[in-house]
Amino acid sequence: MTENEISYEIRSAIYEVYFALGPGLLESSYEFALKHELESRGLNVKSQVKLRLCYKEAVWEDAYRLDLLVEDQIIVEIKSVESLNNIHHKQLLAYLKLSGLRLGILVNFNTDYLKANIFRKLNGY
């Protein structure tokens, strides 16, 4: 599958989970449900993937954790907050940079209007 096809499936699964569970739950609940939904669609999904930080000659192997990594190509960063802040967008962009991946999706499930709370982010943009 192409990145765009995978991205479409991810966004479709996000809606499926949102309509089933609604807003107001913990991020871990949405992570569990979204992983299950994506796997039921035949996608390879890893949760809580360790991300290393390299600084000069020093390496910290498990500096960060990605919420979901889909098909080893797309990072999904899940939030359940009152509103997304600029730091949430920057966090995903930093994960993309550190991982060398190109595409990420940021979603906030704690909202009454999901469409305005799903963002595609590209590494370097």
Image (cartoon, rainbow, N blue to C red):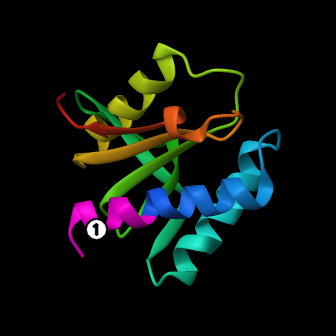
At which x and y percent is residue 100? 22, 46
Note whether residue 48 is visible.
yes
Give the quadrant of residue 107. top right
At which x and y percent is residue 37? 60, 72
Q: Main secondary structure of the magenta part?
A: helix
Mark 1 neighbour density, 10 Å: few (under 14) some (14–19) many (20 or more): few
**Where's the C terminus, which quadrant?**
top left
Question: Of 41 and 68, which appears nearest the observer?
Answer: 41
State the residue at coordinates (79%, 43%): 26
* 41, above or below 23, in the image: below
Give the quadrant of residue 79. top right
Q: Is residue 51 left or right of residue 80?
A: left
State the residue at coordinates (51%, 40%): 115
**Where's the N terminus, which quadrant?**
bottom left
State the residue at coordinates (43%, 25%): 89
User: At label 1, which amino acid type do we have?
Assistant: Glu
- Which residue of the protein is positioned furthest toward the left in this rendering? 124
Question: Of 19 and 85, which appears nearest the observer?
Answer: 19
Which residue bears the numbered disc 1?
5
Segment tinted magenta in the rendering: 1-9
Q: Is residue 21 magenta?
A: no
* 22, above or below 46, in the image: above
At which x and y percent is residue 108? 60, 36
At which x and y percent is residue 91? 44, 27
Which structural element holds mark 1?
helix
State the residue at coordinates (40%, 22%): 90
